[in-house]
Image (tube, rainbow, N blue to C red):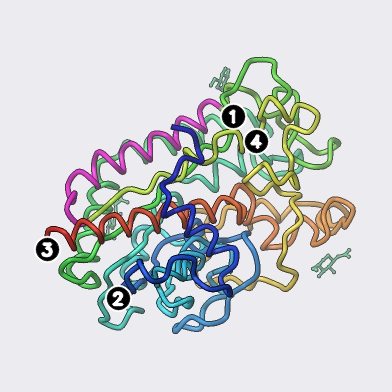
Amino acid sequence: MGPFTFSVLAVVAHACLISAEQQPLISASIPHLPIRVAALGDSYSAGLGSGKFLSHSNDGRDNACARMDGSYPWLLSKLNPFHIGQGYLPNFVSCSGNLLRDIDSQIEALDGKRFDVVTLSISGNDFKFGQAVVNCVYPYRLLPGTRRFEKACNDTLTKAQNAIEDPAKWNNFTKVIEKMKSEVLTTAGRIYITGYAKFFAPPRENDACDSTYFFPRRLFAALPMKSATRLRLNSLVDLVNSKTQGKIISQFASSVAFVDIDSHFTGRRFCEPENDEDPIGADNPNVWFNDLTTTLEEDSAWNPETVTPSPERDPWSAWALDLPESVKNDTEIVGRGIGDNLQRASTFHPKKAAHILTAIKLGNMILEDFARQVSSPV
Ligand SMILES: *[C@@H]1O[C@H](CO)[C@@H](O)[C@H](O)[C@H]1NC(C)=O
Ligand SMILES: *[C@@H]1O[C@H](CO)[C@@H](O)[C@H](O)[C@H]1NC(C)=O
Ligand SMILES: *[C@@H]1O[C@H](CO)[C@@H](O)[C@H](O)[C@H]1NC(C)=O
């Protein structure tokens, strides 16, 4: 199955997403779904780096959490003909940088309300993906601590892998789902967990990326993007996705579903063979991850909450600390400068194009689940 073979409903939904103001194409035959939606999770759900900041959520924390109008929960709420959401998502509580343990406070922010559809993206920060990107993709020669960059990268990848293989983390993930089921889900409601996507095309030894430095100033760049590192990063993403399905989805099959976001990135990752001229493709519309130098749509400042900034939550702040001002603020690298909070944190996050497909896929799954419930009520 190719990345674009969704059902007819999804195609119609896509048409309506693009022209949301126009008349629904088949309104007479499609039910108005009484679906209440909430969105929980981390930056992959908030949509960090995918558009403009939102400003409508009940908790007033859209900027602090970097919730954006290119995020899949927001786009899902706009799948108009089916009324999945109301074109508006007041119960959007996802927050960039959040860990499994932060879901408790996201649940609290929902004030005891219950929802038919709850979307969730979580665990990437617990599994140290941000730190891995900092240490393996964007290290630079003035970074404090070790000068043995390759070892620091390898060690971070090993730590990430150990965390993913730690059963205690998955027990905590299980507890999060149990709490969500008992406190925010309606009886027939469903939680849709979106996975993560592999960052790199299948690595080939000595391909163009093997000698490509992702840090944008060659003088300071410390590590080329070697195929062995890409392979390991990709396999960690696969491991999180497969464990999420094996350890979480399988336990709660009647009320929790997995949404694969990886397959629609096929051909849209960093280091695709057809992009050998520019293997990063920061502003290439066919590369669906942001790079450190991607031109972002948002032009205002992001003020993340810095309650207890820890490397676990924000590995990028330590990264930026020793960056020379001349590089940090160089507007020739990118308009905002790579020292900018939003610029750094958006790195290795999906662009809006990817979120559109996630929203369509999710909308399609919700409709199929709804149709099944209608034909065999619980
Ligand atoms: C890092 O790991 C790669 C393979 O994943 C290995 O080839 C390389 O020697 C390691 N480097 C160091 C410094 O440990
Ligand atoms: C699991 O959650 C508890 C409670 O939040 C926490 O103390 C513990 O460190 C977590 N375990 C892991 C492995 O993250
Ligand atoms: C670099 O940018 C920061 C934040 O915009 C600013 O506070 C600082 O003064 C700038 N430094 C230089 C040398 O322009």
For label 3, count other residues whose C-alpha is less than 10 Å away and answer few (under 14), some (14-19) or many (20+).
few
Residue furthest top as drawn: 205
Secondary structure of the magenta portion, mostly? helix
Q: Which residues are magenta?
A: 231-255
Q: What's the residue type where badge 4 is placed?
A: Phe
Around disc 4, counting alpha carbons within 10 Å, would you say few (fewer than 14), some (14 to 19), or many (20 or more)? Answer: many
Amino acid type at image mark 1: Ala
Badge 2, how many Cα within 10 Å: few under 14, some, many 20+? few
Q: In front: mark 2 or mark 4?
A: 2
Q: Amino acid at mark 2?
A: Pro
Tell me which image quadrant ligand 2 sits in.
Answer: bottom left
Measured as percent of width and height from the top left, residue 320 is found at: 70, 55
Contact? badges 4 and 1 (CB < 8 Å): yes
Find residue 141 and report its horizontal and vertical position in percent. 76, 38
Image height of 235 relative to 122, above or below? above
Badge 1 residue CB within 8 Å of ligand 1: no
Residue to which mark 4 is pinned: 270
Q: Secondary structure at mark 1?
A: loop
The reply to whether the magenta stretch includes residue 343 is no
Q: Which mark is residue 34?
A: 2
Cα gap from disc 2 to disc 4, whole angstroms:
40 Å
Question: Could you say which is closer to the camera, residue 288 or residue 228?
Answer: 288
Q: CA distance from mark 3 to mark 2?
A: 15 Å
Of tags 2 and 1, which is closer to the observer?
A: 2
Which of pointers 3 and 1 lies earlier in the amino acid sequence?
1
Residue for point 67% across, 55% down: 344
Please name the residue that numbered disc 1 is placed on.
Answer: 201
Q: Relative to 357, does residue 118 appear above or below in the rendering?
A: below
| Three-letter amino acid code at the position of disc 3 | Pro
Label 4, secondary structure: give it.
loop
Give 255 or 155, whichever is nearer the viewer. 255
**Disc on res. 180:** none
